[in-house]
Amino acid sequence: MPHWWLEARLPIIVFGVLFTLWVLIPAPEGESDFASRLRNRFRK
Amino acid sequence: MFASADRKRLLVGLLLLAVIMGWFLAFNRLPKIGIVGEDLDTVQSQTNQCFQGFCIERDPGVSFVTRWVKFSITYLRLVTIGMTFAFLTAGLAEAFLFSKSIGKGLPTAGVFRRTVQGTVSGGVMNLCSACIVPVSSSFHRRAGIEGAIAMVQGSTTLNIPALAMVFFVFSPVLGFSRLILAVVGALIIGPIVVLSVRRDRVKSIEIPDTYRNPVDIAGWGEVLTPAFRHWAKASIRYAIKLSPIMIVAGFVSGLAIQWLSPEVVATYLGNDIRGVLLAATFGLLINVPLLFEIPLVALLLLLGMGTAPAATLLFSAAAAGPVTFWGLSNLMPRKALATFASATWVVGALGGILVLIGGHYFWEGAGLSDRVAKASEQRTVEELFFASGSNTFDIADYPNVFDGVPAADEFAPFQNVAPLIGTEALIENRYPGVAIFDFDRDGDLDFYVTSAESNSVLQITRGGPNKLFRNDGGNVFTNVGLSAGVSAETHNSTAVAACDIDNDGYQDLYVGAQGRIGDNLDYRSIAQNPTLAAAVQDRLFHNNGDGTFTNVTTTAFAGHANPRSAASIACGDVDNDGWLDLYIGNRADQDFVRFDTSRHHGHFNTFFHNNGDGTFTDLTVGAGLISPPIRMRDIAGNPITFPAPDNKSIEGFDISVLDGNGNIVGDSAGQTWTSMMFDHDADGDLDIWVGDDGDRLKIYRNDSSPAGIKFTPIEELLGIDQMGQWMGFALGDYDGDGDLDVFVTNMGFQPLERPWPGVPSADCAYYQSTDSGTCFHALIENRVNEESEPNRPGAFAFVTGETHVTASAVVPPSSLGTDFKPASEAAINGLEAYEFGFGTAFFDMDNDADQDLYWLGSLGARGEGPQGDIAPAFGRLLQNDGNGAFTDVTAEARIIDSLAVDYSVLDPGHHDFNAVQQRLGSEFHENGKGVAVGDLNSDGFVDVIGTNSNGETFDANGERVVASGPLFVWMNSGSDNHWISFRLQGRMAIDGTGSNADAIGAKVTVTHTSGIGESITQIREVLGSSSFLSMSSLDAHFGIGSADSVNIVIEWPSGRTTTTDDLSVNQLYELTEPAS
């Protein structure tokens, strides 16, 4: 396993979880951002 | 309490922050302290100064770009986790903590209060100057520019781990300067920046409408769900916005740090204004991982950076850098940013200037803490050993050596080549002996070194295999002890002698041994345990002639090998039957040696007669060689005796002293350290001289006849039954009068520095106080030939005090200093002014046709170890002036028995001379023991091997550790003088007639003409005896100045003679005894 992978794991996991949360949780009414548009596309 | 949405978010936010920070501190920040500790060890090691991707030494095989990219990527990797935490925390702060309407949660009034909030918050964060950027950007929403800047300062310069380490690593001056600058920086830089701009020009951050009316939001889920979404979005936004900036700025920082090099430090970062200003500038051009500035500044201090620029850099390197400025540019206008950078620079520079001024008036050289400074100087024995190769002088400074062109009367220094052998030259033995001999008869000299047993009781005395170093030429010596069968790992080996016991032409090995230290058992108890006895009985290894040896101890001694404590072995044919006999000088079991009591128990010495058939017979008693009781007298001169069986009493020996098994300790004998067989009265047979540690010299005249072997003690007759702590013998014609004189090492002048002992004992200081003995070395002049009767009073005379020695200007003995305070009425003259000695030898160092004198030795421990100051001594090489006076050339000859001595400056008047830094003082001595001399590289100049005890020293933390004893193999670089050498072979090796194969006892007389036409006669006797644990080469070597030919006469032990005239010089002659 490359040495850099050990250090990259944590940021990847953290930001992966954050991105998932951002997409999964609906945006407040009236707001639209990248994650809400992505969510809507998947729901279609 | 948590009715409002803001309070709900605040609560959850604080909980989440606590969890995240707790995890971050526990798994990332605290381990970082260990990493920094390792970095400090690295920079102190002086062998590898690369840490966290940064190497200050330029590797010529690595390009600048590679070095720059490597450091930059390493830096970015190191800050990855910190940055992740920072983005996460920044988003958390924005989403949960810093809502605009929180009200009492986070007060926002006042510049000072916001500054303090930022400082405290930052101090808790423990993030580097790059990682803190996202968090401070978020904090700016609540606490403004001043709070954001204070958070940066608080996190980078005021965090607790950093402050703790700073005070541990650096001196109080630098510790307090960092603390003060950090506090000042945190409290004033932010307000200064705010003052420089109007508040309405500060960028504000939009707060989502969702949070503006918290009273309308009721449930936890309704509050927290969007908050989590906001957290995720904000964190990702920070990462996207700031990461590219940070990566680019990281490479800019990596570029800046490449400016650092040892040359730059020495040239530009001295303790002056320029150094301070450059340090302030440099510090702001780099971003470093958290705490990185600590090992960085420590390294630069070790390379010579001044204290003042160190104070500046310790602050400015941590405080901010390109990533910080670039990352915060989103929050403030350029003017504010410039003010921020300038103010940080000024604070750092002012701090350095104040330290500079203070250093001028109040403190000196306050860089690293004493603990770290000492640790940085602290090298292991192994590191010191490998720094001890002294082949760094320029041979061009010693012209005309070996090229045949005569030069002024000078010599080139010795070169220690032991480091070339490697770690095999590190020995595990308290009593390491060495014997120089040609074990494989390939024409060059090899050597054998003894080690203690591997099964010793105490770890400090644990040994390993004995080593046989085969000479492979070109200063290459290979340990072949194991394959040769002489490694004897479980043998507690001490003294060694190499002599041809069976006259087959190959020298065999007699290896002495001593009892285990720490088992409280003496030899009688040991003899009852076969396993233990095997470890501590002497061994005889027969040389098979094919590179291997066979242990023939059992057959040779019929189960009666010497079980006592062999410290010296003398080989010699006492009855001239052609077979070498053995005299074993035994000391005492180390567990029972004391010099504060009148009980002084030694071991009987042993005389083994060679039967000529591979066996030996113990004839100690019959030959009259049983050791007499020691001399133990009270102040009035009355014997101090103890009861013995049969209503007798014995002087100095108490049979009620028992060992752990209830057996009597020792024998009523002295503790022999050294023994020597030579024909002192020139009557054709070998006499025996014995030196004991704490008794009189003993001289046994050989009165053997065809009726039997017989020796008569005559030390009193000769008038040299002087009490002393005699250690080693050297034999040589120091005064050039054609007979062999004797030098005996002793304690030296050092016991005279303490009060005279009041208790009668074997302490030489007690004898000296009662005028019954001496602590001084003994130079004993041979005057046998001055009258017809050789064995008479005055045939030998102590001339120590009247022998002039020109002291070294570089390393004079302390007895010649103004601080020396001898015990009352103790006078010191001439050669008496010198320190402790063990092994010793006469040899012609510079081939100028006279005998120079060398000894080494120390008592107790190495100088830098526990009790190393008992008798500090690093040996002495005294150059003979040709008239029996000497000059101390120890330093000039580079033969000091200390590791890593810097001989580059040997002029005490030179401004670069520093005896301590150059390790020239006696406080750095190794614990010297054996000495053997011989021409190892066959260049016609005699080389020297010195052994040292293993033992305790102190590690970097001041803890005691056991370290090996280093060998010194000093190769003589020689001079322009000529030489001639003889390797003799007795006829017993040829046809079983005549003299022993080694020709031990043969006398070689060389006559030649000096440069001014004087006739010079030199004499050597082939000596098969050990000086102290050790035995020199049997070759008879002569330095003959500028003579081009010599006449020789060899008197063989058998009585035959060889006479040859006009022998060519600069050659080794192998001569065989004539048939008749």
Image: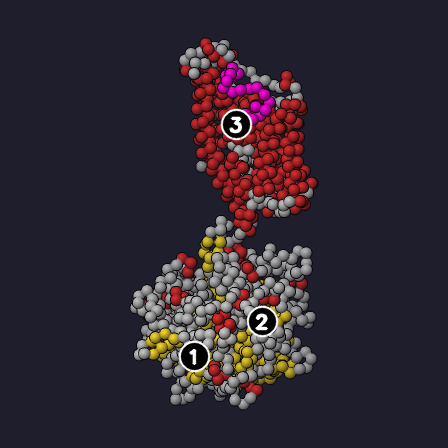
User: Which residue appears at 47% of the width and 68% of the height?
Assistant: B758
Residue B612: numbered disc:
none
Residue at image mark 1: B580
Badge 2 density bin: few <14, some 14–19, many ≥20, Cα 10 Å:
some
Q: Which residue is mark 2?
A: B828
**Highlighted magenta segment, given as a residue range:** B99-117
Colour scheme in use: secondary structure
Residue B991, quarter of the rendered image = bottom left
Q: Secondary structure at mark 2?
A: loop
Question: Mark 3 or 2 closer to N-term?
Answer: 3
For this orientation, the residue located farthest to the bottom is B788
Residue B591 versus residue B66: which sits nearer the camera? B591
Residue highlighted by disc 3: B121
CA gap, disc 1 and disc 3 = 87 Å
Residue B217 x/y as whole percent:
44, 11
Q: Looking at the picture, how far across and down is residue B660, in whole percent?
A: 32, 64
> Which kind of residue does numbered mark 2 sit on?
Ile
Q: Is residue B735 magenta?
A: no
Q: CA distance from mark 2 to mark 1?
A: 41 Å
Is circle 2 on the same chain as circle 1?
Answer: yes
Question: For this view, does B1022 lie left or right of residue B297?
Answer: left
Q: Position of residue B484 (x, y in %)?
A: 42, 66
- Who is closer to the viewer here, B135 or B478? B135
Question: Which of marks 3 and 1 precedes in the sequence?
Answer: 3
